[in-house]
Structure formats: structure tokens, C-alpha cells
Image (cartoon, rainbow, N blue to C red):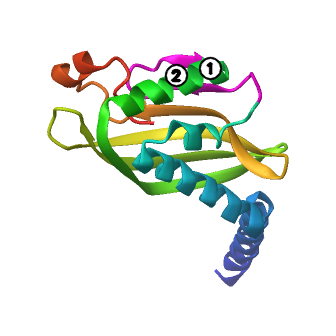
């Protein structure tokens, strides 16, 4: 019995060491993690302020920037389209604030991939307040000393339910 236990014990330590190394290897340096958390905080602040200029300042200046909106999964390419999508979205809102439920960051080449979930508390103009949950993934990288979003793809959780009053009010009234 003891002879069977020893190889299992050794295997357990080896696997635990491998997992620990993998977690350490995939971890972001503290300053990179903090900068990416701040980027997400600033995006939520841009929502709260309904400030398109602030939000666009968080995206790359590259013409290859794109955004997929959560409501109808519209694809917006280039800075002009992405800007218009935010302007249209903010124009439908009386107020909005978001709280990140969870988020993970993964190193990817010269940048970071994030995946997370956010709960938005919002009020569309002319409607009662509501709450929406959005999952997202994005890619960000450092440009000119600043972390920026290169692309963002958001998806409304439980998108099978669409309030027809709200969807006809604005074609772009979902969360970011």
C-alpha cells in the first residue's frame, strides 16, 4: 500500500508545481494589471458621464479599431463608426453606471486580452430604470505609453429577451 501511495504523492507534487508555474507564467506584472484595471474603470466612468470623447480617448487611434455592440451585435469599424455608435448609445440614456462582476486578464503578444462581465444600471430616456448584464472580451495594448482598447466585443446576457418598447426607441440602446 505504501509503495502505491509514494508515486501518487510524487505525481501530485509535480502536477501542483506545474500548475503553479503556469499560473505564474500567465500572470501579468503588477503595473500592467493596475493599468488595465484603470482602463476598465475609466470606461465605466465614461459611461457614467455619458462622455463619448472620454470613451474614444480609451480606444486606439488606429483606423483598424472596431467594436461589436451587445444589443444587435452590430459591427462598427474605424474611429468614425465607433464614435457614432457611442454617440447614438449615449443619446438614448438618461443615466447609466456599471459595476464589474468579474474580469480576467491574459497576456497576448504585445497586449492583453480581457474577458469579463459587467452589470449596468441604466435609465433610457422616457423609461423606467432597468438593469442589464453584459459579457465582453477585448484586446488592449500600450500605445505611446498608454493602454488602449484595440477592439471590444460585448454581448448582452439573456439576449433572447428584448423589450420591444426599448428596441424600437433606439437601434443602438444596449450596453457597452
What residue sits 48% from the left and 30% below the top? 86
- Horizontal side of 121 relative to 154 (left or right) equals left
Q: Quadrant of the C terminus?
A: top left
Q: What's drawn in magenta, residue-wise?
A: 62-76
Instruction: Say if mark 2 contacts mark 1, CB within 8 Å.
Output: yes
Q: What is the number of callouts on the image?
A: 2
Question: How far separated are the C-alphas under marks 2 and 1?
Answer: 6 Å
Magenta-drawn stretch contains 73? yes
Res 98 seen here: yes
Give x and y (percent) for residue 5: 67, 78
The residue at which mark 1 appears reads as 80
In the displayed structure, would residue 165 be above or below residue 119? Answer: above
Q: Please tell me which residue is depicted at 42% across the width and 42% down the height of the picture.
A: 50
Callout 1: SS: helix
Question: Which quadrant of the rendered structure holds the N terminus?
Answer: bottom right
Q: Main secondary structure of the magenta part?
A: loop
Res 156 → quadrant: top left
Confirm whether residue 69 shows in the render: no
Q: Which percent across, then down, holds residue 36?
A: 66, 56
Task: In this rendered view, identify the residue nearer to me: 11 or 120.
Answer: 120
10 Å crowding of disc 1: few (<14), some (14-19), many (20+): few
- Residue tagged by mark 2? 84
Q: Mark on residue 153?
A: none
Q: Secondary structure at mark 2?
A: helix
Instruction: Give the farthest residue toward the bottom.
Output: 2
> 158 and 119: which one is in front?
119
Amino acid at each position: 500500500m505504501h509503495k502505491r501511495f509514494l508515486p501518487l504523492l510524487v505525481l501530485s507534487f509535480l502536477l501542483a508545481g506545474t500548475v503553479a508555474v503556469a499560473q505564474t507564467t500567465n500572470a501579468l506584472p503588477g503595473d500592467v494589471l493596475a493599468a488595465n484595471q484603470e482602463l476598465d474603470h475609466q470606461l465605466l466612468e465614461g459611461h457614467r458621464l455619458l462622455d463619448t470623447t472620454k470613451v474614444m480617448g480609451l480606444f486606439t487611434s488606429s483606423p483598424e479599431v472596431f467594436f461589436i455592440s451587445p444589443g444587435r451585435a452590430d459591427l462598427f469599424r474605424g474611429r468614425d463608426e465607433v464614435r457614432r455608435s457611442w454617440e447614438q448609445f449615449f443619446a438614448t440614456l438618461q443615466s447609466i453606471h456599471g459595476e464589474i462582476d468579474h474580469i480576467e486578464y491574459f497576456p497576448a503578444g504585445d497586449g492583453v486580452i480581457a474577458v469579463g462581465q459587467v452589470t449596468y444600471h441604466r435609465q433610457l430616456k422616457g423609461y423606467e430604470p432597468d438593469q442589464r448584464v453584459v459579457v465582453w472580451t477585448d484586446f488592449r495594448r500600450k500605445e505611446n505609453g498608454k493602454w488602449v482598447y484595440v477592439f471590444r466585443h460585448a454581448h448582452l446576457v439573456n439576449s433572447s429577451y428584448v423589450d420591444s418598447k426599448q428596441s424600437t426607441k433606439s437601434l443602438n440602446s444596449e450596453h457597452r
